[in-house]
Amino acid sequence: MTTTVPTPVGQEVGAATPAARAARPVGATARAVRQTLRRPAVLIALGWLVLVVVTSLLAGPLSPFDPLAQDLGSRLQGPTAAHLLGTDDLGRDLLSRILHGGGVLLLAAVVPVLVSYLLGVPAGLLVGYVGGKADAVADFVVNVLFAIPALVVVLAVSVVTDNNLPIMTVVFGVVVSGGIFRLVRASTQASRDLLYVDAARVSGVTRTTILARHILPNVLGPLIVQGFLLYSGAFLFLTSLSFLGLGFDPQEPSWGQLVFDATAKLDTDPWLMVPIGVVLIATVAALNYVGNALLATLPSSRRARLLTPTRRPVLPVADAHGTGSTAPAPLPAGPGGDEPRLVVEGLVVSFRGEDGRWQPVVDGVSFAVERGRTLCLVGESGCGKTMTALATLGLLPEGGAAAGSVRLGGQELIGLDEKAMARVRGSRIALVSQEPMVALDPCFSVRSQLGDVVRLHRGGSRADVRTRTLDLLRLVGIPNAERVGRSFPHQLSGGMAQRVCIALALAGEPDVLVADEPTTALDPTIQAEILDLLRSLQDSLGLALVLVTHDLGVVADIGDTAAVMYAGQVVELAPVEELLAAPRHPYSRGLLDAMPEDAERGVPLRTVPGVVPLPKDWPTHCRFAARCELATDACRTGPVPIEVVGPDHQSRCIRTAETARGVHPVATGGQS
Amino acid sequence: MTRYVLRRLAVAVPLVLVVATISFFLVQLVPGSPAAAILGPTATQDQVDALERSLGLDAPATTQFVDWLTGAAHGDLGRSYVTGQPVSDALSQALAPTLSLAVLSTLLTLGLGLVMGMAAAVRGGRTDKAVQWVGSLGMAIPNFWLAALLVFVLAIELPLFPATGYAELATEGLGPWLSHLVLPVLALSAVNLGQIAFQARAAFADALGRDYVRTLQATGTPRRRVLFKHVLRNASVPVVTVTGLTFIFTLGGVVILELIFNLPGLGNLMLRSVQTNDFSVVQGGVLYFSLAVILVNLVVDVATASLDPRVRVR
Amino acid sequence: MTVPGTTSPSSPLLRIADLHVDYKLPGWRTTPLRAVDGVDLTLAEGETLGVVGESGSGKSTIGRALLGLAPVTSGSIELAGHDITHTKAGDRKHIASDLQVVFQDPYGSLNPSRTVGKTLAEPLEAVAGADGSTALAEIRGLLSKVRLPDDAVDRYPNAFSGGQRQRIAIARAMAVNPKLIVCDEAISALDVVTQAQVLNLLRDLQRDTGVAFLFIAHNLPVVSYFSDRVLVLYRGRVMESGPAATIHARPAHPYSQALRAAVPVPDVAAQRVLRRQRQAVVRATTAQARPAPEQGCPFAPRCPHAAEVCWTTRPADTPFEDRVVACHVFDAASGHPQAGGAPDLVAGELAPTAP
């Protein structure tokens, strides 16, 4: 048996989870389906399927000859005017035999699909929703079904039932129903625990309504798609049976039997293979193609590739200055005129849109960090903080490219090729990322991952690597390094995993550590521990630290300098103490005022109205103007340059002079 | 890990029992008596009764089942109703070609599928398109038709490989054994290759977007090592799982290809027994095939558990 | 609204007594995980009770048990005088009119394939049996209450930002005029500005309708800013409970102190003090700590005041000033070396950052 038969389970392994797939509104899916059905290739495939069905239905009137009529005078002819596709060894017309040979097959293939849906869908919905013991029982039944090779069982059934085709198709349907059951159960389980289903339960919505309203729609899309693939599998399976001479009336022509006849004359008359082969392959291919095209319309959570391309993309010169609305700001000079450890100047990060245009998400960012100092990148989500941080390591996700200047100890990193950049990473600049629980490879132990990096940077004997690995784990505050080293990432708590990530980052003894929201996913007491750890490491190793955070409390705790980012730009760059005591940009003031941590109980918080605009909606004038209570017409006339407002203090606001005099409404609850 | 394997074994044992039960009672569903079916429509009632007695078919079904099961546990599956040969002997003799075909095809599809999926996911663009076309085409060609095509091209027009037959590995050596298997293995693998390649493509695409890729690259680990050590291992887990699932279909394909290439395997034996109403062999054959599937799934479970430690806790 | 610090009225809106919730862990013959371990709480009409704790503290489980989404092992839950401990999801229609929820994840809590109008109509239909046309008027009113435009009715959730979605979720909870809303980390996923917007909205709604909140979160300063009374949870047990203002200013239980000191404040000088304190109020980091004892106090491994008794005996709930603390130091009869030294502990360890 050849098959595309259901590996629906296959599709669920590794593919996006159904929950993630479901996260799209109905309108969008309907639109995607309509667009797919209009694609020429899909139309051709559908057209072929319609043609096959119609000609099989009208086989009688359309056939030029009786498919059974023998004409020994014209045996084994190639295509002729009379016999368009030639004749077989008994002189029967091949075209007529093909026209007559598909009907029963095409119809019979519907039976397994129906049977497996009738069994699999209700059972999957019920078991998926109820779970518990029913699940264990159903799982065993499905395991039994999956242990039975369908063709072999149907062979046995053909003996038992004296070649009864309907029974054979039903049995086949039962055997493959396990796949449909698993598909439905998986989608149901994923939907069952969704928060909106919980919300419906809380409102007392009945179980049937929840199943019909919130769960079935999520299951339906995959089911319809699976229908095409299952049908194509069943069709191939039945063709195999017909090839073996089972199930179908040997007197009537059928497609599998036509192939069988052709193979007998393979050495003398290979032409016999061609027409039937084309028909079979085209039909199965069309079914699969339509199925897969529909599958692509289901919402999926395709992840952007994080592996760097072999050739790092370069922003075209025209796009290398972002929107060009901002001149690079003058950088505060380092002590003694030496260039600081890490200097970022006029950094632009753009992503290539579907239309091929480059959309900047970081637009002319400049800052510098000294040895042993910490610079915090602060702002709300969508302001470009993380992309700025990743661009310094050359680790932008798929589709992103950076321009401008990133200098590490005097060396320009933008424009380095991937090989050279890999040598810089880890040994001179390293990264600690936001989600420690997914930042480690789940398949390797802590010891193995950390050991690899140690070996990469220092080499040495196995014992040396081992000693250094354990030392690193102790360095990041893990006392039982041996035991943690043997653990796999899924056995670690979030705080422990983050310590391991920091050890990984430090393995190559870098000068600069970039930490992208290293504590956001952690509990408060764990956050405090990690901040203390970063600070002590910085003191002992002299690290320059770039820390991305949205929490001004974290900034106060660990930062020396802060760069407040808004809509891809730095809007204020200042020593932390100054920024928190007397912010000079209205957005910085807004962030500070919104913090409830030290607000007075019972007094409403001061907030900034509205939300951060998407990159495509960035105006050319002051990007904060729409939300700023100080905004005047002058703010909406043109790009606002960043201005020096004090020693080491810059602000991108034309009314900074007034903010300095305290024109700002005084914050409630904040204290200085 | 040992505990995990033991747990999987504990699940497999009842599965084997249920499958054995199904194998037995499947044949019990024959309307009328198997003896009548064997003897054909011309037989008299006396002849049928005599045959039933000699085959032990006059005992109650449950007694027969217990006897058969006890026998099966000792490797005795009864005797062929037609040839009188012990069923287990007949099946064992036919095992080698079937296993050769199934195992070679599985390894080929797994290896090639991983490579194709990886290339498609990593390189994208034209490579991706090409893999999708090849995979889709493979999935659309019926294996019996492909077999005929391969025979025509590689055995008749260009006589590179034998068109039919089988050579024992033990007696005739590696070369002949392999050359007899090339065409059937190719014909058998086309469909699953597409399936596995698509799965691998999805698995690689998923693994390439995981955070650890970024973490590892940030430590200076070269791109190639991230790809071939970490991404490959993570992506292999779902691919190996799917290989286990497609094995059922591989076995189905084996039956057909053994017929076409005239290999003396289990599939051919089954087909012959089906034609001659040799129920005891059919019964044993279903059991053998099912055991093979259960065994392969066990191997797959152990393989995924050794690749991914998270599987072991399940 | 209850004045902070005063006792609750005689018949509270919500009374939870000795609640235990066990989760069955996956796998064969595993010991169940005790998520909530003997929690008592009461909540008056119009009051806000903050429940604060870290992951694994059982704070969300309490909310889910109350909502009928987690199985109650033992104990009782009484809402407006009715016992709802074991009321199944299907029979919750009459409870739903009193009790609603706002979840943490504004992306997961709205069905992406249903319009905002349909989402808001759901509780109205289920609870009040409202039909389409009467519901529409109410939905318009709800949207204006949460400051969203009228035309939101026909749009899908993907057209809205995280903060706007959270407003929709709040509107859904408010649709049936409940007496109590469980806010399960309702602001934890939001940016600071949006968080402030949502907190203000919740406060306005409470002022206008007198709804009570069970406000669950992991950030003690935020919880104490927003709540009247606070319950500090650790590993399924209540460590300390009392008026929000005092727990914020002078946390008594060593764990509350650790939690309070762990959240940094946006002020460099104050944070410098707080940082020293947070290092003083825990003895061991989580990475160094021994596993918590089966008996005894769950915080013992990290507590600087832990003594022998803390490893062996479960601390009793001890009244201290205007709150209740489960710590041997506060219990004069506990046999702890520092027993009865509570005032020193509270005065010495944590200099409050607010005046």
Image (cartoon, coloured by chain):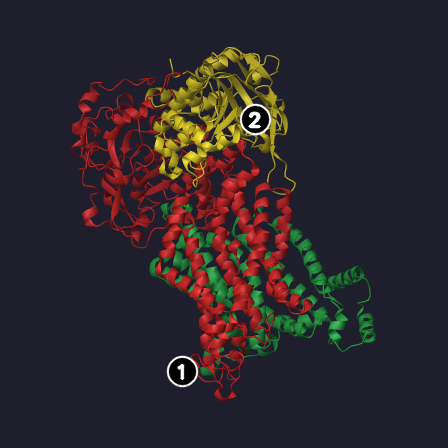
What residue sits 60% from the left and 63% below the top?
A169
Indicate the colour of chain A. Answer: red
Residue that numbered label 2 is attached to: C94
Residue that numbered label 1 is attached to: A81
- State the quadrant of the C terminus of chain C: top left
Point out residue A617 in the picture as x, y percentages from the top left corner.
26, 38
Q: Do labels 2 and 1 share a chain?
A: no
Instruction: Output the chain of dot 2.
Output: C
Q: Between residue A92 and residue B246, name the one nearer to us.
A: A92
Point out residue A381 in the picture as x, y percentages from the top left corner.
34, 35
Left or right, B120 with respect to B87, comes to: left
Q: Relative to A488, say whether A294 is above or below.
A: below
Q: Distance between the residues labelled 2 and 1?
A: 80 Å
Q: Relative to A233, say whether C311 is above or below.
A: above
Left or right, C327 with respect to A629, comes to: right
Indicate the colour of chain C. Answer: yellow
Indicate the colour of chain B. Answer: green
What residue sits 30% from the left and 19% below the top?
A667
The part of the image, by quadrant, that contains residue A377 is top left
Q: Between residue B120 and residue A181, name the one nearer to us.
A: A181
The part of the image, by quadrant, that contains residue A271 is bottom left
What residue sits 42% from the left and 44% below the top?
A26
